[in-house]
Image (cartoon, rainbow, N blue to C red):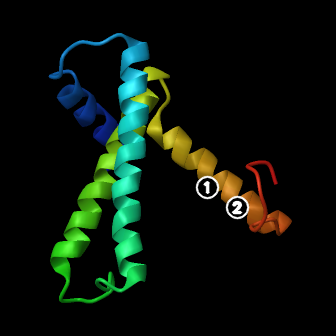
Amino acid sequence: MNFKLYQDELYIIADQYPSLKDEEKLAIYGLGLTEEAGEVSGIIKRHYRGDYSLTDPANTDLRHKLALELGDTLAYITLICRVFNIDLSVIADFNLQKLSQRIENQTQLGRGSSR
């Protein structure tokens, strides 16, 4: 699936929810993103704590749960893009450019976004 198709399909689904003002949507989407990122973090934490291995081929249920949570984070990111009228593929392109520039500048490690 490509980003454009994903955005179009997600927006159709999102339009089925109650109508909210953009400021309300932004609050819900931002908080939803944080909540879902926390769920992803919880899965990773449990891996490091030793509850289970993320790489165990027998653990397909865990990988499925992780994929679902990552999908929820992607959905909230996409909905935030909608509030600001940003194409998700533009974000992906910008991010790849930024990361490539860090490799070129040998600034992969460090602090802050502008390095």
Within 10 Å of disc 2 (Cα), the crowding (few <14, some 14-19, many 20+) is few
Residue 40 spot, x, y in % from top left: 36, 60
Q: Is residue 39 above or below residue 72?
A: below
| Residue type (three-letter) at the residue carrying disc 1 | Leu
Q: Is residue 95 above or below residue 51?
A: above
Q: Is residue 50 above or below residue 34?
A: below
| Residue type (three-letter) at the residue carrying disc 2 | Ser
The residue lying at 16 percent from left, 74 percent from top is 61
Say whether residue 78 is visible. no
The residue lying at 54 percent from left, 39 percent from top is 90
Residue 19 spot, x, y in % from top left: 23, 12
Within 10 Å of disc 1 (Cα), the crowding (few <14, some 14-19, many 20+) is few
Q: Which residue is mark 1?
A: 96
Name the image quarter holding the C terminus. bottom right
Q: Which residue is mark 2?
A: 100
Q: Is residue 44 above or below residue 111?
A: below
User: Do the CB atoms of the residues marked 2 and 1 lie less than 8 Å apart?
Assistant: yes
CA separation in Å, label 2 and label 1: 6 Å
Say whether residue 87 is visible. yes
Q: Does residue 113 appear left or right of residue 23 in this picture?
A: right
- The residue closer to the viewer here, 4 or 27, is 27
State the image quarter where residue 41 is shown. bottom left
Q: Does residue 48 appear left or right of residue 20 in this picture?
A: right
State the image quarter where residue 109 is shown. bottom right
